[in-house]
Image: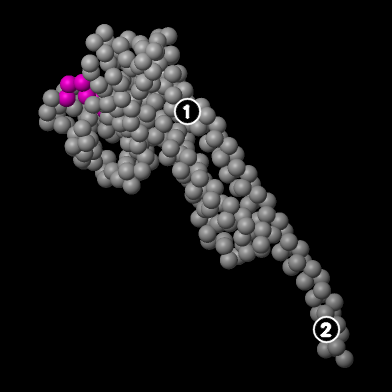
Amino acid sequence: MKNVYFICYKVAPSLPLEKIAAFLKTQMTFSWKEYIVLKDKQLDIILKTDSEDKSVYLFKYGCISFVNFSNNEIYDFLKYIELIIGNIDYSLFYKYHESHSLEIDDDLCCSLTGNVNRKIEYTDDINHIIAIVLAKSVEMFSFDAKLSELLGDAEKFIVFLQKGRLKWYRKKSCLIISKILRFQFDSINSVRVLDRPMLAEQSIKGKETYDSLMEYFEMNDRYKILQSKINDLQEITELYTSLSQNQTEHRLVMFESLLLLLFPLFYIIESLLKL
């Protein structure tokens, strides 16, 4: 009987994989550079101990999946990575993480989701796929938290705007709009969060393993919820633009009306001055 333990942490908004790969003299994984994998001698050097059965997966959207790492080894690894990329964001580290474990029997079979009636042959590719799915799941948690915060703020300034308090709330609304735009830019890193990785496309077993784990972590359902929140955020942004434009047009109309009222007054004053 053997246990394999997985845990993934969000450590940064994004990771400079090219910089890390160059420093560690390793190759990027797959053509579109989603992540890099460290194991064997590379980990021996970093951890300064035998790293058999251990591996690390670093993803471009700021998540790191650890396989068979103790807490002390995770700490040592992060301190080493900080030498390459700078300080880790430990506020993200403590907030966004997820774990999973496999129990491998003497026949080298395991259950992906704990269902003993559904066992498959264990291979290293399973570790690989679990590490990927965990990272996607953690990124979704982070994504959802950002969306919820932005929605809460955006709804507040729409209320202020509807009450005609745009001038008082302009700085705050501009800040929120900038956050929304920044979020939309950053979310580009997560666009492919539901895409099946190339490794899972290489065999029927890989596809089945990946799809089973995606179902177990409810990734598709969670994505639908995120998409709904994104649509709500876009609607609020459009409402802000519409209301802001209406208020601007209203002020222009009021200014033009004032000029029209002042014109006959100027005419009367000019006539009186000529008398």
According to the picture, the residue beneath numbered tag 1 turns out to be 219
Task: Out of 267 and 90, give the one closest to the viewer.
Answer: 90
Q: Amino acid at mark 2?
A: Glu
> Is residue 86 depicted above or below 188 in this figure?
below
Where residue 162 appears, as percent x and y from the top left, is 66, 58
Where residue 167 appears, as percent x and y from the top left, is 60, 65
- The magenta stretch is 51-56
Residue 103 lies in quadrant: top left
Mark 1 or mark 2, which is nearer the start of the sequence?
1
Task: Out of 258 and 40, give the one closest to the viewer.
Answer: 40
Q: In what quadrant of the picture does the C terminus appear?
A: bottom right
- Residue drawn at x 47%, y 35% is 188
- Residue drawn at x 32%, y 10% is 121
According to the picture, the residue beneath numbered tag 2 turns out to be 270
Where residue 91 appears, as percent x and y from the top left, is 33, 47
Mark 2 surroundings within 10 Å by alpha-carbon count, few (fewer than 14), some (14 through 19), many (20 or more): few
Judge left or right: residue 239 versus residue 194.
right
The question of residue 149 being in magenta is answered with: no
